[in-house]
Amino acid sequence: MPLSSSPRISSLDAFRGYTVAAMIMVNFPGSWDHIFPTLRHSEWNGLTFTDLVAPFFLFIVGVSITLAYGSRKAEGGPMGTTYRKILWRGLKIWLVGMALNLLPHFDIYNLRWTGTLHRISVVFVISAIVFLHTSWKQQAWICALLLLGYWMVMSTIPTPGEGRVLLEPGRNLAAWVDSRYLPGKMWEGTWDPEGILSTFPATATTFTGMLVGHLLSASMPDPLKINALMTAGVCSAITGYFLGLVFPVNENLWTSSFVLVTSGFAALVFGAMFYLADIRRWTSWTTPGVAFGANAITAYVLGDLLSLLFYGLQIGGKSMNQHAVKAMTAAGMDIRLASWCYALFFVGVVFLPVWIMYRRKIIIKL
């Protein structure tokens, strides 16, 4: 997928990088039994900091699609080569996701066929191809229809076997579709948070990013872009909140209200970064994020690989993270704070090779 944007928009690379860093941080706490509530995914309805990470990344994918393929679209002509590049890039990301799912035991009989990278790959391919053949207005309509259609489907079609509409864990239409048609092992046994039906509204999240990409590419002064971006972010978040009163904000189902709220927040965060880095030219804070963002997927993969050492290697019957958390709590630190500190330490561990790659201008493009 497009992992680089126009050099002028350094805030986008920083946003991407800090999002990946946050993804690594919440995926690898010092202890899964002791985590601050906002650093966990919501058990069902609701929204935590952790719930924002995945939609933020898909939003960034959408922005990057517009910036990366806008000129190719404007050129017109045959798109065969572009299609092949899009499909090949999506396939590579999906295969990397499958390889990570095989770790650490390479148990092919209990292999999960979906996950974070799988969803990114599918959503990227769909969104990029649609982008090449539609205007921003058509993309806005498709996004709205995806959100409205998903809301109607999930809220009006009775769950088979239940005889009524349900939006409960494992007892809803999306879970039923997964149990019938999703191959392999599922994250929650009989259903998966990155399942089939929820991929449709996840695509809408990427479309919201594509629309922001159109705004950034428009011929208007940057202050007007900021005003439009921040206004859109507030309106989207408010609309999502009120929709959530009837179709709850829920990451596991990736509800339409979840898309609107998280895309609104993403627009606000990105708008603030864009103002600081690209309008005021305060860029010193962007360097770590840009380093992560330059090799975003690589950093994510490195996190999984290095975790085999920092979380899997046993020393004296305990893993490194267990020893570290025990030492910090013995010194009087709250165990949840100790768990978070180790997560931040692990982000730093991943950052070291990423920083070296960035300094040497090594960029691994999937």
Image (cartoon, grey):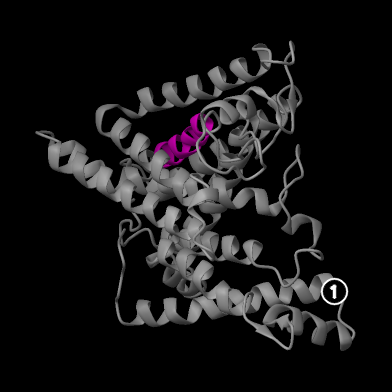
Q: Horizontal and vertical percent for residue 83?
A: 21, 39
Residue 275 seen anywhere in this rendered image of the structure: no
**Which of the two residues, 324 or 112, is positioned nearer the viewer here?**
112
- How many numbered marks, from 0 up? 1
Above/below status of 133 relative to 313? above
* Res 204 seen here: yes
Residue range highlighted in magenta: 199-212
State whether residue 231 is above or below residue 40.
Answer: above
Q: Main secondary structure of the magenta part?
A: helix
Q: Residue at x 32, y 30 (%)?
A: 130
The image position of residue 95, as x and y in percent, is 37, 53
Q: Quadrant of the C terminus?
A: bottom left
Q: Amino acid at mark 1?
A: Ile
Q: Is 43 part of what is drawn in magenta?
A: no
Q: Position of residue 318 (x, y in %)?
A: 74, 81
Residue 47 spot, x, y in % from top left: 72, 44
Reply above or below: 143 against 47: above
Q: Which residue is mark 1?
A: 335
Residue at figure coordinates x 65%, y 40% from the top left = 251
Name the quadrant containing residue 219. Answer: top left
Query: Mark 1, residues whose alpha carbon is within 10 Å: few (<14), some, or many (≥20)?
Result: many
